[in-house]
Image (tube, rainbow, N blue to C red):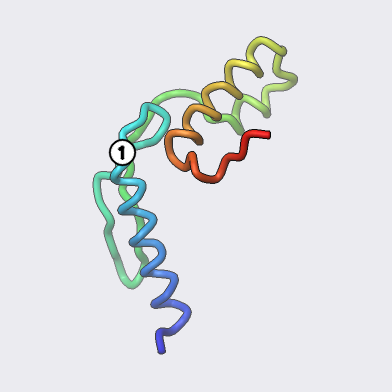
Amino acid sequence: MSSPRTKSLRRFQREAKVLASLNHPGVAAIHGLEESEGTHYLVLELVPGETLAERISRGPIPVEEAIEIASKISQLACSVTPQIFLLK
């Protein structure tokens, strides 16, 4: 039976492969899956720009900007995992 650490590493590796297979402007490219002294990590593309967290921290978001942000997020989410969205 696999240890929790082994299961976590396998999941990390699977998710890294899925992320690496994506080609979307809203997803940073993976340049490598590395390990150093027992710690595994991803080497990601450096994408210039403001994160959503940074934008939120600046204060209230006007409706027009919020709609633009929500549209970008929904386009990305649907391109990555369309099977999780239900239309009712």
| Residue displayed at 29% across by 44% down | 21
Describe residue 45's horizontal placement relative to residue 7 as left or right: left
Describe residue 54's horizontal placement relative to residue 40 as left or right: right
Residue 61 vertical placement versus 22 (above, below) = above
Task: Name the residue carrying label 1.
Answer: 29
Dot 1: within a 10 Å radius of its alpha carbon, few (fewer than 14), some, or many (20 or more) residues?
some
Q: Nearer the viewer, residue 11 or 44?
A: 11
Q: Residue 32's x, y, as percent?
A: 25, 51
| Residue displayed at 55% across by 45% down | 84
Q: Nearer the viewer, residue 5 or 2?
A: 2
Residue furthest toward the left?
Answer: 31
Residue 27 vertical placement versus 12 (above, below) = above
Q: Residue 29's x, y, as percent?
A: 31, 38
Residue 31 vertical placement versus 62 (above, below) = below
Q: Nearer the viewer, residue 57 or 19?
A: 19
| Residue displayed at 42% across by 30% down | 26
